[in-house]
Image: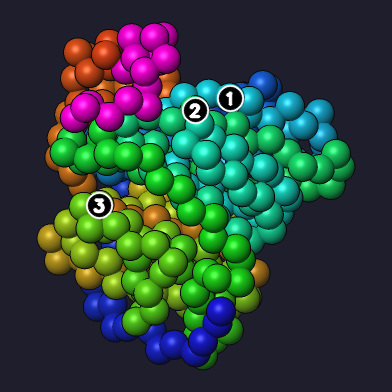
Amino acid sequence: MNQPAKLEAVSHPRTIERIVSGVLTSDGAGVKLTRVLTQDLQQRLDPFLLLDAFGSDDPDEYIAGFPDHPHRGFETVTYMIAGRMRHRDSAGHEGLLQNGGVQWMTAGRGVIHSEMPEQENGVMEGFQLWLNLPARRKLTAPWYRDIPSDEIPGYSTAEGVAVRVIAGTSNGVAGAIQREDTEPLYLDIDMPADSLFSTALPATHNAFVYVYRGEVTIGGTKLAEKRMAILANSPQADGVAMISTGPAKAILISGKPLGEPIMQHGPFVMNSKEEILQAIRDFRDGRLHDDPAR
């Protein structure tokens, strides 16, 4: 889904506050990945809790996948650039995530799910983002949606920049998902050499850019491949602008801060220690999914 679009005027683009390299780690049953947005950045990048980047053509680094594991209190957004992964969860949802598709899951009061590769060779590459839920919605019913690649809205600019709008609205194009509380913007930006891309952003929103091919320049600072830039928050800023010298691909993510306490213990993210302890008890006792209103 692609359409021509005219870039909105951005007169005071954001600059880079900090460049982050990420931490090499593994998760699930040993899947190798880079944790770009780590727990120590959660307050700064509220409402975002985590960003993992994964990419390998070695099956030994991804084939074991992510067997059954629980979540409570937030949303997961998995964007598969290349590869095939099967989702199953305890709420009865199942779907196949493949090239260019997105899986958006609201864990809410609790879900146990698995994400397992359906390939034994080739490249598996993508991102998983954790998006916080406000306190009043942390115990909402679980929800899930598979968004195939051809259902993700997109646009192209006069300079040949191709943009996929996974969430939010950019340059007049509304994305596949909208969220009222956190107002996330999630763009995948494919830039040819010597091109400019810009989009409006509310000055009050936290934002970051991760380059996964090539390099871009933001506010006069170069951002290299496999690096994340935390964009500075300034009252007069009205958007972001980036320039490519060679071909480049990046994701741009921004959202409205919740301004609430963040308490994380592994796969549970709540607002207090007491709520975390309750989540652990509920999981232990097989009551993670129970409706607290019943």
Q: Which residue in the protein does label 1 denote?
A: 68
At a point 42% along the width and 19% down the height, the residue shown is 266
The image shows residue 253, relative to residue 199, as above or below, that is above
Pick whichever, 33 or 153, lies toward us.
Answer: 153
Instruction: Identify which residue is drawn at 38% across, 40% down.
Output: 142
Is 288 within the magenta?
A: yes
Image position of 259 (left or right of 99): left
Label 1, label 3: how many angstroms apart (C-alpha)?
28 Å
Along the horizontal axis of the image, is 194 left or right of 139?
right
Point 82% across, 36% down: residue? 58
Horizontal and vertical percent position of residue 148: 60, 63
**Amino acid type, mark 3:** Thr
Q: Position of residue 6 (x, y in %)?
A: 40, 89
**Residue at the disc numbered 2:** 112
* In the foreground, 50 or 149: 149
* Real-space Cα separation, disc 1 to disc 2, in angstroms: 6 Å
Earlier in the chain: of badge 1 and badge 3, it is 1
Q: Indicate the secondary structure of the residue bearing disc 2.
A: strand
Inspect the image, locate mark 2, and give the three-letter code of the amino acid beneath it.
Ile
Q: Is residue 167 left or right of residue 47?
A: right
Give whichever of discs 3 and 2 has the lower sequence position: 2
Task: Give the quadrant of the N terminus.
Answer: bottom right
Nearest the eye: 224 or 73: 73
Mark before the other along the chain sequence, 1 or 2: 1
| Scheme by which the image is coloured | rainbow
Write down the residue under mark 3: 182
Q: Does any portion of residue 227 appear in the rendered image?
A: no
Between the C-alphas of marks 3 and 2, the distance is 24 Å
Quarter containing the C terminus? top left
Q: Where does the magenta region start and end?
A: 279-294
Number of numbered labels in the structure image: 3
